[in-house]
Image: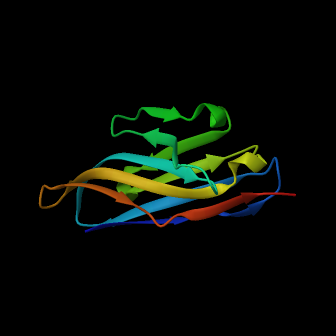
């Protein structure tokens, strides 16, 4: 069983910054990908940023240049630094991780999400 816990969400004014954290725990042998998704009210969940085990990253076009994803493999953690936040960034942000458990089964796990609200 693998669990993800996100933190760092909150209310911020337009132009402000937030740093989201996600830590994985449990029966983990290896984590391949750790990603951030978001879901705004009435919209589908979308991939915001991804960080592969090879160190490659990719971003949703609308956040490129403003958001930065990073990983700490020793801590099984992934972070999302969000700068120059806009009202349209308001959403619940979810962490997703995929990898292999200690019993050599693949897993793909979601966190419960953390709310980010950008408003003046």
In the rendered image, residue 70, in percent from the top left (x then y), is placed at 50, 45
Name the quarter where the N terminus is drawn: bottom left
The residue that appears at 34% across and 59% down in the rendered structure is 109
At 77% from the left and 46% from the top, the residue drawn is 86
Locate the C terminus by quadrant. bottom right
Q: Residue furthest left?
A: 103
Q: Position of residue 6 (x, y in %)?
A: 51, 64
Q: Is residue 2 above or below residue 87?
A: below
Question: Is any part of residue 8 visible from this angle?
Answer: no
Q: Is residue 82 left or right of residue 102?
A: right
Could one spot residue 75 in this view of the protein? yes
Q: Residue furthest front?
A: 42
Q: Is residue 15 above or below residue 21?
A: above
Residue most extreme to the right:
120
- Residue 83 x/y as whole percent: 71, 45
Residue under the image location 57 percent in, 53 percent down: 39
Q: Is residue 29 left or right of residue 110?
A: left
For the residue pair 92 and 21, the one nearer the viewer reads as 92
Residue 66 image point, x, y percent: 68, 38
* Count of number-bearing discs: 0
Q: Closer to the camera, 48 or 83?
A: 48
């Amino acid at each position: 069983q693998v669990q993800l816990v996100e933190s760092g969400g909150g209310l911020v004014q337009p132009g402000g910054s937030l740093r989201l954290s996600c830590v994985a725990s449990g029966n983990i042998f290896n984590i391949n990908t750790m990603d951030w998704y978001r879901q705004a009210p009435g919209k589908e969940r979308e991939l915001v940023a991804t960080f592969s085990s090879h160190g490659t990253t990719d971003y949703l076009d609308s956040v490129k240049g403003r958001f930065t994803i990073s990983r700490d493999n020793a801590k099984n953690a992934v972070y999302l630094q969000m700068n120059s936040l806009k009202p349209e960034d308001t959403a619940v942000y979810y962490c997703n991780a995929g990898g292999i458990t200690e019993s050599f089964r693949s897993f793909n796990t979601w966190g419960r999400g953390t709310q980010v609200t950008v408003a003046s």
